[in-house]
Amino acid sequence: MSTLPEFSLSWKWHEPITDVRDERTVTWADVEMSIGTHTPLTTVEDPATGTVRPYTTGSLYPLAEWIAFNWWSLTADARPGTQISQLRFAYKNGVGDQRGSWWQRSRRHVMRAACDGFRWPDVLLVPEGRQTRIVWMPDGGPDPRPGPRYLARGNLVVGSEALTETLRGLVDAVVARLTEWGFDDTPLQQEWTALRGTGEDEAAFCRAAARLGLDPYTEAEPYADAIRRVVRELPESHAFDFLNGVRPERITDQLAWLERAREVAGTAPAGRPADPAVAELREVCADVRETFLDPGRLDNAWHLGYELARRVRAWAGVGDTERFETDALLTYVTEPTPYVDRGLVAFGRREGAQGPVLVSSRRYTERPRRFLQARAICHFICDNDPDFLIVAAHTHRQHLARGFALELLAPARGVAELLGRPDGLVTAEDVEQISEDYGAGTIVVEHQLDNQVLAQDFPFTPVEPTVRRAAPGYPLGTAR
């Protein structure tokens, strides 16, 4: 079984060294955070002595308060995943208070926002479903403010359930420490007591609001009826994707589009005879599907997507340097939405009189359309529910489909073959030519180069093509 590294958080209390007894002085501690065997996130350089140590020192009260007051965002809001490239540097030197709503939402996920006079590491936490992504950055450049200088860098995923228990354990310990020292009515204790007493119906609403990027207590009220409608009317997996994708003010409009998309899928022109092909693919890829759906496993979703795509290409008899024809396995229909909300991308249906159907919410040119179709093929193979949504969210399940689409359209081994120059720089012309050969976007090829071909020292040795039979309902690929 594949396992993810664990996020660990340990501390050692200090005895108060002043006569002032408040919630901060009685929760002073040495704190160490780490993930697996990697360098601790709290590795700091003491500016006074220049020495390096794996822990930081400060009051745990602000950190516990930040966790408690942002609990639903930290455990359910995946939206910052679309902005990681920006957020990685957002809190480089501190926290700005005069910012817009984007910055305010980011404060719920970046540990450095738990400042209150203390300097925490620049750590970003984004839940992606069963997994949570943790990105941490070092302090770079001159900083006029005093405090430790954090040195570590990383980007890893950990199990969400285990992380939640670790965060809960920290807050419980801080609350217990406060009680031990005679405090019983701090804002943290009030908030944590209320959270601990949350009923399941209220918790479901809070998670749904957080998936929309909202604070359930201060921002969700205008959308409360619409949120409850989503939870009531959509299957759980659909509600999860829907809420992670749409804008709050467009919930009702997008529910209406979803109804139209279902009708369109039921009346679409009969497609190619792909039903037997999709059924066979589900059989061929059953073990990968079971691995992904097994709640006890935490395999990397991107890597499972790559493996699934290689399995599909082998089944179809399409070589590593050949273009895969996504149209062969589904009927594609466009039902444009008039609303400026690109979060809900498409609706798909695996079974029906029309065969596998994909209904897109906007018109695409060829290359992005093929990427969308490839994501749909992944859902045809892996989803238990015959109906599914494709959304612009970075969740565990959507990562599987994106990884699959990358490898299906531009397999890493084929990209290495077509590039043929392991020691040379990759030019824009190289990327465009390979993109043209595969009928894939240049960003698809760039992702494959960055994440597989170059990053993993992928072999550039030409591979002899293997002749395979064409699978039923799928034409044999043609080498370019």
Image (tube, rainbow, N blue to C red):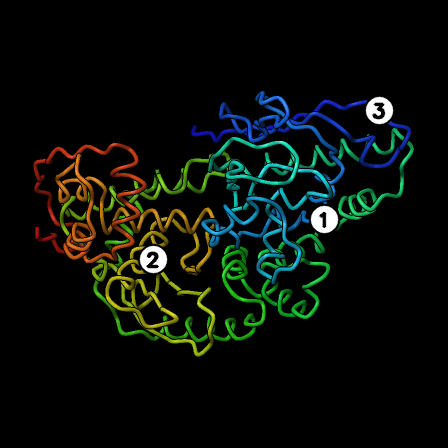
Q: Work out whether mark 2 precedes mark 3 in sequence or the reverse, and give the earlier one.
A: 3
- Distance of label 2 from label 3 (alpha carbons): 61 Å
User: Which element type, helix, strand or loop, lies under badge 1?
Assistant: helix
What amino acid is labelled 2 in the image?
A: Ala
What amino acid is labelled 3 in the image?
A: Ile
What amino acid is labelled 1 in the image?
A: Phe
Check disc 1 and report the residue beneath it.
69
The mark lying in front, picked from 2 and 3, is 3
From the viewer's perspective, tell me whether residue 212 is left or right of residue 281.
right
User: Which element type, helix, strand or loop, lies under badge 2?
Assistant: helix
Question: Label 1 crowding class (10 Å Cα cut-off): few <14, some 14-19, many 20+?
Answer: some
Which quarter of the rendered picture does the N terminus lie within? Answer: top left
116 over 203 or under it: above or below:
above
From the viewer's perspective, tell me whether residue 336 is left or right of residue 205.
left
Question: Label 2 crowding class (10 Å Cα cut-off): few <14, some 14-19, many 20+?
Answer: many
Foreground pick, 67 / 154: 154
User: Which element type, helix, strand or loop, lies under badge 3?
Assistant: loop
Q: Work out whether mark 3 precedes mark 1 in sequence or the reverse, and give the earlier one.
A: 3
Q: Residue at x 85, y 43 (%)?
A: 186
Q: Which mark is residue 376?
A: 2
Foreground pick, 284 / 358: 358
Q: Work out whether mark 1 precedes mark 2 in sequence or the reverse, and give the earlier one.
A: 1
Foreground pick, 313 / 121: 121
